[in-house]
Image (cartoon, coloured by chain):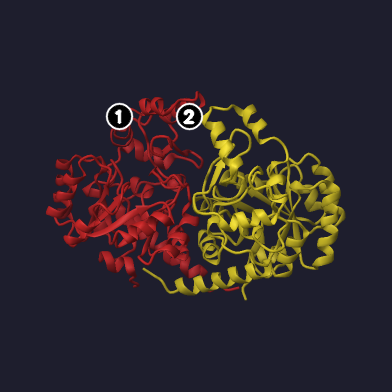
Chain colours: A red, B yellow
Amino acid sequence: MNSNRITQLFQIQYPVIQAGMIWCSGWELAAAVSNAGGLGIIGSGSMYPDILEQHLIKCKAATDKPFAVNLPLIYPQVSDHIDLIIRHKVPIVFSSAGNPKTWTSKFKEHGIKVVHVVSSAKFAKKAEDAGVDAVVAEGFEAGGHNGREETTTMVLIPMVADAVQIPVIAAGGIASGRAMAAAFALGAAAVQIGSRFVASVESSAHINFKIKVIDSEEGQTLLTLKELTPVRLLENKFYHQVIEAYQQGSNKEQLANLLGKGRAKKGMFEGDIDNGELEIGQVAAAIREIKPAAEIIQEIVAEFNHTIEQIRHIRY
Amino acid sequence: MNSNRITQLFQIQYPVIQAGMIWCSGWELAAAVSNAGGLGIIGSGSMYPDILEQHLIKCKAATDKPFAVNLPLIYPQVSDHIDLIIRHKVPIVFSSAGNPKTWTSKFKEHGIKVVHVVSSAKFAKKAEDAGVDAVVAEGFEAGGHNGREETTTMVLIPMVADAVQIPVIAAGGIASGRAMAAAFALGAAAVQIGSRFVASVESSAHINFKIKVIDSEEGQTLLTLKELTPVRLLENKFYHQVIEAYQQGSNKEQLANLLGKGRAKKGMFEGDIDNGELEIGQVAAAIREIKPAAEIIQEIVAEFNHTIEQIRHIRY
């Protein structure tokens, strides 16, 4: 049994991290992942502070293993969220979408480990300079909100690994042990997996969305709405409305009006798969079954070990 | 020293293939790569038949190792090219941009090995059904013309490897031994490398373009002109004209007029780096030096071996 800089940093068994995702990763998924030896993350971006507090209380009751909260730093009530994270002694924060300089030192004062999500080597360096303990380097193929550089995981991970001294967690396009082994070859010390855990039993995604994910085919996601915030969407009626709006030359305001409010909740949490915004990664096309989180982790780790076993003797 | 299905198929030492690229890969680069133990490819898409013939004659004079020709099947004088390939006993053809059913059997009748370039598992299956010997699975991050699915190398390779029985060559975002090791973990038996060989001594790219490539930074390429044929361009004056044209809501005809004719030659071969069309992959940002092709291959293979050495004991 190996350990590395990430398993040591988080005190976890496997370097497999479940991405904090709006509407899909509440306490039930986070606790299941942490109990299975990975790192579970509560996605706080879709929660009001009182809801987040309920999730923190339930998560702590469901696991005595480390877990984390994903915190989009542009969240309107971010300081309320931060107070809750400190008060409930959450051991690890994954911050995203904002400047890591603003809050990292406050977290560190309270003994909280901080990881920041980046989409370029330049931002990785800035996050390291801000004092974070690790970075998630997330490629273009990832679901949900995404970097403007469009750099893919294959290109991004080695550049980030070369740019910083802190450990790198690879994200984007990873749903299997083969991809985990590839990420390690590229220089990552762990993987962050989103889409695969959307299609887990414990995910809070609506069952209609989970079924839509496992039924999806290659080429059915698109990184779009770049004028607002770039987001990778799964093909549905709303997605085609977005494409049509572009074909008609819609401006930023018209796109914002089309998107409206609450579409992500409608699609992913309430199960309106036609009119909702369905955020998922490209790798959804390779996901075929809804399984318990613990089984997903066991499968990924077993395939990782098998992959290394297969390539370990190759030399040229 | 290992061998695998690709080194056996092509009778080469290293499973490292230099991509056939318009204006950048003539006989000099192809011969240098083949002489160094990889597979060199002449990019015929930018050559008139009489020019291709000169390159075939010179390549055969410069190496007695196997080499290949890349043949875009939509090329206007494709049957002239095919006659030359057969007459000069080129052992291997990499076909792209067209239906592999049309010509594969003719090549096979003449004992020529055929590899087809695909951007999805669906097209890989079709190529296998057409009788090709292997496929190149090329991800979104690759330079030049590119698939409409936008599937990245990390997501594409395992899906293609699962879909076909024939060996898979990974392309897109690969310029190092780390990425080569990652591709092997994902299920590839070889890598095809373009951008890194553009910045080689023997590449026929203009020195201005080579310097522009090694000076480029992350986020400076963009897959664009999707209404015509999707192509990944390096940031320059022309690239900004394209972005401006989109912002002004230009239609397909206006974009075609802006592109005009001969822009790729102007940029990549004649060295007009402002007004030319510069085709390069995302991984250009990680390329820092112009080196001889043989040195590039030795570096990649050494880094591959080192990477496998580093990860071979990891188990969880």
Q: CA distance from mark 2 to mark 1?
A: 18 Å
Chain of the residue displaying label 2: A
Q: Position of residue B197 (x, y in %)?
A: 65, 60
Taking depth in this image into account, of B42 and A193 the one nearest to the observer is: B42
Q: Position of residue A39 (x, y in %)?
A: 28, 58
Taking depth in this image into account, of B151 and A32 the one nearest to the observer is: B151
What is the quadrant of the C terminus of chain A in the image?
A: bottom right
Taking depth in this image into account, of B101 and B236 the one nearest to the observer is: B236
B302 in relation to B268, above or below: below
Mark closer to the chain start, 2 or 1: 2
Disc 1 crowd, CA 10 A, few/some/many (<14, 14-19, 20+): few
Chain of the residue displaying label 1: A
Would you identify the image quadrant in which residue A233 lies? top left
| Three-letter code for the amino acid on which mark 2 is drawn | Ile
Q: Element at badge 2?
A: helix
Is B153 on the left or on the right of B263, as rendered?
left
- Residue B89 appears in the figure: no
Q: Position of residue B171 (x, y in %)?
A: 59, 55
Is A109 on the left or on the right of B56, as rendered?
left
| Three-letter code for the amino acid on which mark 1 is drawn | Lys
Disc 2 crowd, CA 10 A, few/some/many (<14, 14-19, 20+): some
Residue plotted at (75% across, 58% down): B68
Q: Which residue is mark 1?
A: A261
Taking depth in this image into account, of A149 and A198 the one nearest to the observer is: A149
- Residue A101 appears in the figure: yes
Can marks 2 and 1 be said to lie on one chain?
yes
Q: Which residue is mark 2?
A: A243
Residue plotted at (34% across, 45% down): A198
Would you identify the image quadrant in which residue A80 lies? top left
Q: Position of residue A173 (x, y in %)?
A: 44, 51
Q: Element at badge 1?
A: loop
